[in-house]
Image (cartoon, coloured by chain):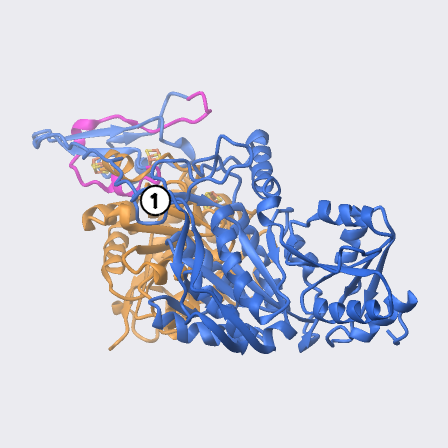
């Protein structure tokens, strides 16, 4: 499949760091696209600025609109309303979509156009040097919070659901098959869909939090993947108490 | 236990990013994949297939590899053939250009507010998309578009702010529709980054700025012309842009149509710089039987971001036509491929974005002359101020002064050559403005004759007596 997906859907290899979680998402996304038979000639990928935004542009062999930082969802709104026949998909990071662009995200969820928004959440700004973002967990080390992040993060699932998104999901890159299934569901959904993709940034987040999180072994990214698996649990399995503080993963459909 | 070997494991070492990854090496439950021994020219040590016979085909490695470097194939089945791709459905070719269209309003006289006439001009020009955010004194444009677009099969969206409005208009333009937004001072400031994006990506769109008294929130319903410089210099990096300045309800209609035509012709945002006077004024205007419209060229396969010519305007296909467009605000070559460290591509792009406008100054520049035949002094005026100025010129002529007037209808690119000629032909140029002197500075740059500024910044329409007094006495009598 690796070769098939590369040749069918991509233009060139990515410039991502070795082991970047965004690459694992890209892999799962193209598996989903292929299984679904999504027509790339009728699909527009809109992305802003940051490592996550580079997943579709310049890599996917579809129409790509690589826009200003944080505004991808707003551009996508124009693309989709002007031509509803197009599949319009936004892919970007937590800095882009949920921090500088948070306003556009909640309004798109409220507006409920059939856009698909994938937020590759690696808990900080990767490309610009590992600064704190709106999803950095409290206490985590970033280049602008050397003593640990004093602020509380957004829970993007709660945020999107609170804003009215009828499909919200969260999947980790450490479980690529579940992630792929979720992507298929999001892409096939007929309304607005938002996914908080738990990604991983070994270069910025991994290095800064290696000691704190105990990412051990020669392959830091492998350790991060293992660690990520241990911090999540299917939302159905978590009772309301959630004593271990696990991050719920799965899908939330609005009861309608 | 012996087992039939049924899986082939291919690991493309050119794609593998090596020892800082090794996700596959750690993930494979059968020890098929191993750390590499060979160091590549890039200094990477790619993973390798060590024990292919042990592969059970679980595909864990294949689904986790961030670089799609691993392919597992079932050798008991026919080899997977990649379907031929790269077959692009060609866009429906359209060479674009001028056409004549019946207007949207009944031909003949109409009576309405300037903001409404602007909306009607947009509809007549083929505008099919509007995104906006409420703001005084431009909201009436949005209100009318909210009614008119659904009637004419277009799309209207009220966005969450002006940043989003500008973004949505650009997105819609690439979906193939002519789009517009309208705003005023604070909203215009918010649009600046995406206006620059539209310049860089050569996206046709129309932005109406109904100028109000600033700075900041200022006086929301009062007129001024403080955004002249902002229209050109507000976005970072330095770009050429086109801006038109209407002085009447008639021109709120006519110049909106012209703004769309110029934006399609040159693939550039065109700014219509109205003000609270021409926006809210009600007067009659005339609608012609037909409208001349320009449409962007949609030529399949042609590079959408480059031309042989140094001052060329490339064709612009739309999304969904199989062109697989790469559109980016980063520096790019003629196919949209990012070239963020190539000095030649940067220079060529920046040059062409500028040259495609300034080399066509003749096509863009628009002005009107009054009493110019015997003029020894010329008033240079624009927008609603020109209404006061013309009244003043007439009074001054009643007193025997040989004064004429040049009224600018296009302000960017600045028609410096026209100004130079009139400067040479006259003894003085007088620029009345409802700002602290923006166009007067430009006039000064281009004229060798003395240039005088008549400035008024009290949030009122230019007082005609202020200009008259200046023309008669050479100085303003009214308190500033
Ligand atoms: S900086 Fe982080 S997110 Fe960006 S490519 Fe490198 S690993 Fe990935
Ligand atoms: S997962 Fe892919 S990139 Fe990483 S080491 Fe294995 S083959 Fe190389
Ligand atoms: S398919 Fe499974 S067994 Fe085969 S190499 Fe990959 S991870 Fe190992």
Total residue callouts: 1
Q: Pick whichever, B89 or B112, lies toward us.
A: B112
Whether label 1 lies within 8 Å of ligand 1 gets the answer no
Q: Pick whichever, A57 or B252, lies toward us.
A: B252
Which chain shows up in blue? B
Q: Residue at x 61, y 77 (%)?
A: B281
Side of B196 where B73 appears, left or right: left
* Crowd rating for badge 1 (residues with CA inside 10 Å; few <14, some 14–19, many 20+): some
The residue singled out by tag 1 in the image is B94
Q: Pick whichever, B292 or B123, lies toward us.
A: B292
Image quarter for residue A132? bottom right
Q: Residue at x 32, y 42 (%)?
A: B93
Side of B455 where A176 appears, left or right: left
Side of A142 where A230 appears, left or right: left
Chain A color in figure: orange
Rendered location of residue A88, percent (x, y): 33, 56
Q: Chain of mark 1?
A: B
**Residue A169 shows up from this direction:** yes
**Residue B160 shows up from this direction:** no
Q: Pick whichever, B146 or B384, lies toward us.
A: B384
Residue stretch in magenta:
B40-67
Classified by dominant secondary structure, the portion drawn in magenta counts as loop
Ligand 2 lies in which image quarter?
Answer: top left
Rendered location of residue B469, percent (x, y): 87, 71
Question: What secondary structure is marked by label 1?
Answer: loop
Rendered location of residue B145, percent (x, y): 44, 72
Q: Is residue B65 magenta?
A: yes
Rendered location of residue B320, percent (x, y): 31, 49
Image quarter for residue B149? bottom left
Q: In the image, is residue A17 above or below residue B109?
A: above
């Amino acid at each position: 499949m690796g070769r098939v997906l590369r040749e069918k859907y991509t233009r060139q290899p990515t410039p991502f760091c070795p082991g970047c979680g965004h690459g694992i998402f890209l892999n799962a996304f193209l598996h989903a696209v292929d299984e679904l038979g999504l027509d790339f000639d009728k699909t527009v990928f809109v992305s802003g600025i940051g490592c996550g935004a580079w997943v579709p542009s310049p890599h996917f062999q579809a129409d790509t609109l690589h826009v200003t930082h944080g505004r991808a969802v707003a551009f996508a709104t124009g693309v989709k309303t002007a031509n509803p026949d197009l599949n319009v998909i936004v892919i970007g990071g937590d800095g882009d979509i949920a921090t500088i662009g948070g306003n556009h995200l909640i309004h798109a969820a409220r507006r409920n156009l059939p856009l698909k928004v994938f937020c590759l959440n690696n808990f900080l700004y990767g490309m610009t040097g590992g600064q704190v973002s709106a999803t950095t967990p409290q206490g985590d080390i970033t280049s602008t919070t050397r003593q640990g992040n004093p602020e509380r993060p957004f829970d993007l699932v709660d945020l999107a659901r609170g804003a009215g998104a009828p499909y919200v999901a969260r999947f980790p890159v450490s479980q690529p098959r579940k992630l792929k299934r979720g992507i298929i569901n999001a892409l096939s959904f007929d309304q607005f869909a938002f996914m908080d993709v738990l990604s991983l940034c070994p270069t910025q987040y991994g290095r800064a939090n290696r000691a704190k999180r105990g990412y051990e072994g020669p392959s830091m990214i492998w350790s991060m993947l293992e660690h990520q698996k241990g911090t999540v649990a299917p939302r159905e399995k978590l009772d309301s108490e959630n004593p271990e503080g696990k991050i719920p993963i799965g899908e939330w459909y609005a009861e309608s | 236990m012996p087992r039939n070997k049924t899986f082939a494991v291919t690991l493309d070492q050119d794609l593998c990013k090596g020892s800082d990854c090794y996700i596959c090496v750690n993930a494979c439950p059968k020890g098929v994949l191993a750390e590499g021994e060979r160091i590549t020219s890039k200094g990477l040590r790619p993973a390798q297939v060590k024990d292919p016979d042990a592969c059970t085909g679980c595909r864990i490695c294949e689904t986790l590899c961030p670089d799609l470097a691993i392919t597992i194939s079932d050798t008991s089945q026919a080899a997977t053939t990649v379907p031929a791709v790269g077959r692009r459905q060609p866009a429906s070719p359209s060479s674009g250009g001028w056409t004549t269209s019946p207007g949207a309003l009944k031909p003949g006289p109409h009576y309405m507010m300037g903001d409404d006439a602007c909306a009607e001009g947009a509809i007549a020009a083929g505008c099919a998309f509007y995104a906006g955010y409420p703001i005084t004194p431009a909201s009436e444009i949005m209100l009318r578009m909210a009614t008119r677009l659904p009637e004419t099969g277009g799309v209207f969206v009220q966005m969450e702010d002006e940043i989003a409005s500008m973004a949505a208009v650009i997105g819609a333009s690439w979906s193939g529709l002519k789009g517009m937004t309208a705003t005023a001072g604070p909203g215009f400031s918010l649009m600046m980054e995406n206006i620059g994006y539209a310049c860089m990506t050569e996206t046709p769109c129309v932005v109406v700025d109904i100028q109000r008294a600033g700075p900041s929130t200022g006086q929301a319903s009062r007129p001024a012309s403080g955004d002249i410089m902002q229209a050109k210099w507000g976005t970072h990096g330095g770009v050429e842009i086109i801006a038109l300045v209407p002085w009447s309800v008639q021109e709120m209609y006519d110049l909106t149509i012209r703004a769309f035509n110029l934006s399609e012709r040159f693939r550039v945002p065109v700014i219509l710089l109205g003000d609270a006077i021409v926006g809210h004024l009600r007067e009659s205007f005339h609608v012609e039987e037909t409208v001349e419209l320009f449409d962007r060229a949609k030529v399949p396969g042609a590079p959408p971001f480059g031309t042989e010519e140094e001052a060329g305007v490339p064709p612009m296909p739309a999304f969904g036509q199989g062109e697989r467009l790469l559109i980016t605000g980063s520096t790019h070559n003629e196919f949209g491929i990012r070239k963020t460290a190539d000095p030649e591509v940067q220079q060529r792009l920046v040059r062409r974005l500028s040259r495609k406008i300034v080399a066509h100054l003749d096509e863009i520049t628009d002005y009107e002359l009054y009493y110019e035949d015997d003029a020894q002094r010329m008033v240079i005026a624009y927008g609603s101020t020109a209404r006061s100025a013309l009244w003043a010129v007439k009074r001054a002529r009643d007193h025997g002064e040989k004064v004429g007037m040049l009224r600018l209808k296009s302000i960017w690119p600045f028609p410096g050559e026209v100004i130079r000629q009139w400067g040479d032909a006259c003894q003085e140029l007088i620029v009345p403005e409802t700002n602290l002197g923006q166009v007067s500075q430009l006039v000064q740059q281009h004229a060798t004759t003395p240039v005088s500024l008549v400035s008024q910044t009290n949030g009122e329409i230019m007082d005609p007596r202020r200009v008259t007094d200046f023309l008669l006495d050479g100085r303003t009598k009214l308190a500033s």
